[in-house]
Image (tube, rainbow, N blue to C red):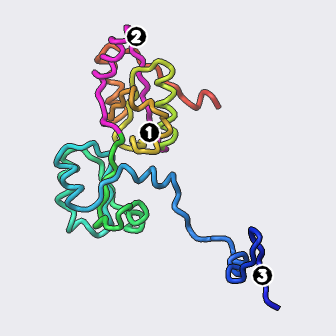
Amino acid sequence: MENFVKKDNFVKKDNYNNFNKKPFRGKRFDKEQRDDNECTVEGKNAVYEAVKSGREIDKILFASGSIATVGNIIALARKNGIMTQETDKRKLDKLSTTGAHQGIIALCAAVPYRTVDDMLAKAKEMNAAPLIVVCDGITDTHNLGAIIRSAEVSGGHGVIIPRKRSAGLNSSCAKAAAGALEHLPVAKLSSTIAAVEELHEKGLKVYAADILHFC
């Protein structure tokens, strides 16, 4: 006996098997992953020109064993103070949106980084005492974005992050900040200590929160 499926007042036989197919179990393209990949530059020539032009770059990832072909780019990046990291090629394959990364991908900032002077100028413009948030060890982009958003709505004038061991201003961070990145300056300094020293030099008082006192 043949099987039939009735739909919209007419009978179809050919599409019966479509109703018995198993649910899709493969890997779907995650929208959040796409957001993370929006601020990337891929390929040797593209990354080299991005570094050479002074574009804001959070980190450069290059495939293990590729130093012979991308060594000049890595050297220039390190000379310009850009963090570089050797990683497995499979990670680059996952991050790549073009499928032709040539063993190197630059993770770029969604907005340009600013300076402490920009933050002080913003406070002066608002006729308010400077309020600047210094982050240390915030490696999750969503958490960093939430901090930036909270600082902005609290009347802050800027956020400082260290160059190492910190999340960057990628698209996920910008999304979590909910527009605050367009209004609040974010500076990247060599370290948290350097940030505190510069704030002291500018005449600001620094208060620190220690999680151990809240346990």
> What residue do we see at 28% from left, 21% from top?
117
Q: Is residue 113 magenta?
A: yes
Image coords of residue 56 (percent x, y):
27, 42
Amino acid residing under circle 3: Phe
The one nearer the camera, 61 or 193, is 61
Q: Earlier in the sequence, mark 1 or mark 2?
A: 2
Mark in the foreground, 1 or 3: 3
Against 202, is 211 above or below? below
Task: Give the residue type that dot 2 points to.
Answer: Ala
Q: Amino acid at mark 1?
A: Ala
Instruction: Please tell me the numbered disc located at residue 174.
Output: 1
> Which marked residue is nearer to the observer: mark 3 or mark 2?
3
Assign the N terminus to one quadrant of the image. Answer: bottom right
Vertical position of residue 108 compared to residue 119: above or below? below
Residue placed furthest toward the right: 1
Q: Which residue is mark 3?
A: 4
The residue where tag 2 is placed is: 129
Residue 107 among magenta residues: no
**Which class describes the residues within 10 Å of circle 2: few (<14), some (14-19), or many (20+)?**
few
Neighbor class of circle 3 (other Cα within 10 Å; few <14, some 14-19, many 20+) is few
Q: Position of residue 148 (x, y in %)?
A: 46, 31
